[in-house]
Amino acid sequence: MDLKNVASLSFFLPEIIVSVTILLIIVLDLITQNKRSLALVAVAGCAAALIATFDLYGAPPGWMFHRMMVLDNFSLFFKVFTMAATILCIWMALGSNEIKLVHQGEFYALLLTCTLGMFFMASSSNLLMAYLSLEMVSLGSYVLTGFLPHSRRSSEAALKYLIYGGVASGTMIYGMSWIFGMTGSLDYSAIQLALSQEGINTAALFIAFMFILAGFGYKIVFFPFHMWSPDVYQGAPTPFTAFLSVASNGAGLAIMIRFFFPGMSKLMASGDWAFTAGAEWPQVLLALSMLTMTIGNLCALNQRNVKRMLAYSGIAHAGYMMMGLAILNNEGLAAILFYAVVYMIMNVGAFLVVGMISNVTGDEDIEDYRGLAWRGATVPAICLAIFLFSLTGLPPFAGFIGKFFLFSAVVKQGGAFAVLAVVAALNSAVSLYYYAKVVKTMFLDSPAPEDKQVTLAANNFTLLLPLTFLTVLFGLYFAPLVQYTNHSLRFFIK
């Protein structure tokens, strides 16, 4: 299937629904006094787009909009993933004191604009489309990071994000121009075909690959493109921080996998992938994976701010997921998709508790969690402990199963990949220290006289308890999620 513009609209319904929802929120924001209703409109639009996305699973795969976008199970998976993350974060925002103080209509409109850009990232089959969609997400993210008008920390975070993002974006498009110069095309299929021919300058190809990797690395926050992450996570509104940590990273993974696998690698009859000679990116990712997880975990050890600690934790988890990319087979890719889902559940849950406590204390320092379990927040303390132990990779939680699949896929490759698995296991042990430090503070430390009693509204638990339940459930019964992620590894390649 190779559709032109008008014919493609039949398979573009989720994006159309999100676009209409954005416009509707902007109009309603001008005429309604009940700003809470805007969040409900956003959730309703997201739910409709999610249903429309599931309907597309029965559609034939193929190219859309003159091969600028592709419709296949892989793109649909990340659309479902992004929409689920968006709904969770809007739900979080409903109970956030930070969001109540800002222009809520603009917040939800910008958040859905980022979501729309992530849809395009997941479907991009052309370097130009990939770049434009990534910039669409980035520009909205810069604004949302600095959305707290009276917070110098928020403004500083937005400025740093903008500077790092601008440099990474310019570097990436420069690398894309090299690819275009060598292959004469921006289309992934044409690039893969051209790179398989003789006469390609391998040194120039490797340099172009490194430039492009800088742009992807900035989005997924792996070393050495991670430096913006702690400041942005700490300064941004907590619901948007949660969105960045899962949806943005997930979309970055989608665009990176689409480029490096169907774009720069060839699918073999065995089901494994063979990379283009001269662009030995699996070896580069192997080294970057070890560096990313190690630096993320070591930097998290001495953090006193929980959001900043979770930022460095996110860097480490990006390193874990990169393991699945480096081994260059579908088993590794399936492990990444599974881990992305469970990471979304447990990380959004952790940020939800952080936001709930911040509403009461006005801060996110670990000291504010002293004796939390005995200050009226027993349930949130237990839930946060479950999320943190799951992030560590302890059984019987979902994070353990996610890491098991990743480590298993890596160990099967043997050789240098066995070293990678050992490094990842050691890093998981290191992460237990800073996760357990928060749990120890909540349950074993005595509250100080100035520590406030925590009073939480009942609606806070409507999201917290389901996320906790799923974190435990997918640690015990994960077969349906495994089947779904395996089913999603169907790229349209012609």
Image: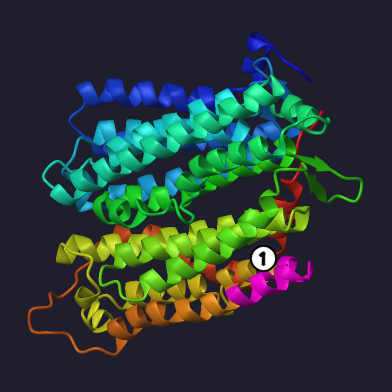
- Location of residue 3 in the rendering, given as x and y in whole percent from the top left corner: 72, 15
Q: Is residue 438 visible?
A: yes
Tell me the element at label 1: helix
Vertical relation: 162 (above or below) 1 = below
Residue at (43, 73) in percent of width and height: 388
Could you classify mark 1 by the number of other residues whose Cα lies within 10 Å: few (under 14), some (14-19), or many (20 or more)? many
Q: Which residues are magenta?
A: 407-423
* Apparent side of residue 407 relative to residue 175 in the rendered image (left or right): right
- Location of residue 279 in the rendering, given as x and y in whole percent from the top left corner: 70, 44
**Which of 376 and 110 lies nearest the eye of the viewer?**
110
Outermost residue to the left: 450
Residue at (20, 46) in percent of width and height: 156
Amino acid type of disc 1?
Leu
Residue at (36, 32) in percent of width and height: 139
Residue at (79, 20) in percent of width and height: 1
* Apparent side of residue 324 relative to residue 93 in the rendered image (left or right): right
Q: Is residue 339 visible?
A: no
Main SS of the magenta part reads: helix
**Which of 430 and 214 lies nearest the eye of the viewer?**
214
339 part of magenta stretch: no
Quadrant into which the C terminus falls: top right
Identify the residue position indicated by label 1 in the image.
Answer: 406
**Which of 399 and 259 lies nearest the eye of the viewer?**
259
- Location of residue 361 in the rendering, given as x and y in whole percent from the top left corner: 16, 66
* Apparent side of residue 222 relative to residue 370 in the rendered image (left or right): right
**Which of 365 and 463 lies nearest the eye of the viewer?**
365
Vertical relation: 123 (above or below) 226 = above
